[in-house]
Image (cartoon, rainbow, N blue to C red):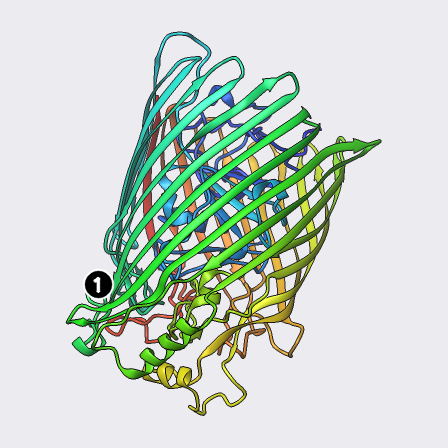
Amino acid sequence: MKLTRLIRASLLAGYPLVAASPALAEHATTPQSREDALTDTIIVTARRSNSIASDAVAAPRQIALPADAAAIAARVAGGDIFGNGALSGQLSYRGLAGERVLGRVNGQRFASGGPNAMDPPLHYAPSVLVERIDIARGVAPVAEGPSLGGAINAQLVQAQFTDGEALAPQARMASQYRSVDDSYAVGGLAALANDSWRIGLIASREQGEDYRFPGGTAVGTSFERNLYGVHAGYRTASGELFVEYRRSETDPSGNPPFALDMVFFNTDFVQGGFRGQVAEDVGLTVRLGHVAVRHLMDNQTLRQPAAPPMQARATFADADTMTAEAALRFGQSRSHIELGADAEITDRFVTITNPANPAFFIDSQPDIRAERFGAYLQWRGGLGAVQFEIGGRIDRTEQTAGVPQLGNAVPMGPRGLAAAFIASGRNASDTTFDGVARLWIGGEALTPRLTLARKTRVPSVLERFAWLPTEASFGLADGNIYVGNQALEPEVAWIAEAGFDLENDWLTLRPTVYYRRVDGFIQGTPFDDTPGIVNSPVEMVASMGGDPTPLRFRNTDAELYGADLDFVVRPVRQIELAGTASVVRGQRRDIADDLYRIPPANLRLSATWATDRLALGAELFAAADQNRVSQTNSELPGDGYATIGLFARLSFDERLAFEAGVENLLDEDYAPHLAGRSRVGASDVPLLERLPGPGRGIWARLTAQF
């Protein structure tokens, strides 16, 4: 029995299979390279229908297409989203988020360009172009690279090889209108391919205005983004040579929880390599990549009201990431040894300016460089009925910071902090070790599974080298001011999780319980023993920024534990009930406090009735109150809520479909607990209140494949 379980949009994610027949498989396979008792896959657009195995009829489920692909990934069991703006959401997975969850697009990892993570990895995956989202269940294998928790990869649509020698055209298109923010999205693929060559062009355009909620309009939430690219592959008897290039251009887009909004992100992606078999039972994968991010954010272009001249800020940020990886696999898919190595080199530079005063500028992250080199060994095999995947990896990380430059208009407080930073070591090095052991027993209907792991995370360059007290916190958006700490040690997580997959003709059920003990958990803590008393240079500068109680990143101890499940019930052929349920608890072990931004318990239920051409359904999402909140981060409790949506899909044939629906049918006034707090003054959302969810609206979408 194949251990992969597919969380398709038509099954659990509630998302349309773009350009696909409504008669897609209940348990379709996906082109994974490793065993997937270990991976959740959300398919958001279908491959060409003849490449998806079918063994039953599934009715597609549909939701309004969010611009932020993180909102799709958040629908997985154990998932939620940090709502920091229409294009800046971060996946929260089993209570972990940010750099603790490995994020990639098309298998390529890279550094965010924004110091406050305005561009987390899925910022570069427009939903209208996403083909599937793979999420490592609970713990990422060592082969995927270092990460404290799971891993996520968004795969964009690409041309596919065919079975014939003649070049054949391929095309996909999706377009949508959404009334709640008067937004539209359009994107697609145009390609030519045969059995040896494939070349494709992709492009998308998205634009939306400030969204409406029952209390008015959430000002400062408009967005605009373009993406275009080209990719190609050449297949030989031994494998495929591939190359791709993409350009992502985000124009002025709002980030109400932050002090600044996006003016632009201009980002170039390039990667290429080889994947295939170089000898009998010997596989080789080689990949090289480069990502260049150029970013500007300010409080003038979109912010209402704009900051007065003295407080006007425009921050320029660059980030360049070079990656290289290679892996050799000896053996068959179910019994092999994989040996690999990878490298990641990142250069960052961040300068804060005042557009009204050229003499005011501060290099808050000057010439920051991080180099990581790693190697791993992973063994996949079996012992009797027990199957296993066991791996270990070692990584060496070097981090350095340059000398900050300051303009003549910068006051003495920051100058003193800059001088102290220049006199410090401004470098760090760490050697980390990860180990993951997964075991499962495959059966016709029941698959028990167990995972034990030791995972690590090296402190980020922001956590170590943020010498200037600012609100940059990689997207926490809690209004606190943070400062770095060069004495930080890596986080070490000890993880255990257990569950089972149960599947028969009418039921699919996958519950998991887990425990994660984290030593050295990096958390913002009071800067000194006298919070609120301004008696240090850091507190003086922070007080000038409006917060006399700054937080300093320190190693603490924490634990996260919980349970989640997804299920599908098929009482009759035309009716399907599906859903997810999740609960997680996160708390400090060194003091009596809860961790910040831990999702509340939530439940998602959907029901669909479908024929070969028509599907109708409804979805309920409910979140409980969240009263276990972080006192350290001044977090306020969150209220529970429930929303209902309706959806329908009409398939004209296997290549053309029309979809429509109503979101928030009852016009519920609610604010998700993980939503950021608005910093926009001229908005119907009160200052420092959580951003509300969108109100009632309709949406319509047309999808096609040729």
Quarter in which the C terminus is drawn: top left
In what element is the residue under mark 1? loop
Q: Amino acid at mark 1?
A: Leu
- Nearer to us in this view, 642 or 162: 162
- Nearer to us in this view, 348 or 149: 348
Give the total number of marks visible in the rendering. 1
Quadrant of the rendered image containing residue 257: bottom left
- Nearer to us in this view, 65 or 550: 550
Quarter in which the N terminus is drawn: top right
Q: Residues within 10 Å of mark 1 (few under 14, many from 20)?
A: many
Q: Position of residue 637 (x, y in %)?
A: 51, 75
Q: Residue at x 57, y 29 (%)?
A: 28
Q: Residue at x 46, y 61 (%)?
A: 461
Q: Position of residue 25 (x, y in %)?
A: 56, 28
Quadrant of the rendered image containing residue 598: bottom right
Query: Which residue appears farthest toward the right when viewing the image?
Result: 384
Q: Is residue 558 above or below residue 251?
A: below
Can see residue 395? yes
Residue on which the image places disc 1: 302
Q: Is residue 15 above or below residue 399?
A: above
Give left or right: position of 176 versus 553: left
- Nearer to us in this view, 521 or 204: 521
Q: Position of residue 263 (x, y in %)?
A: 24, 57
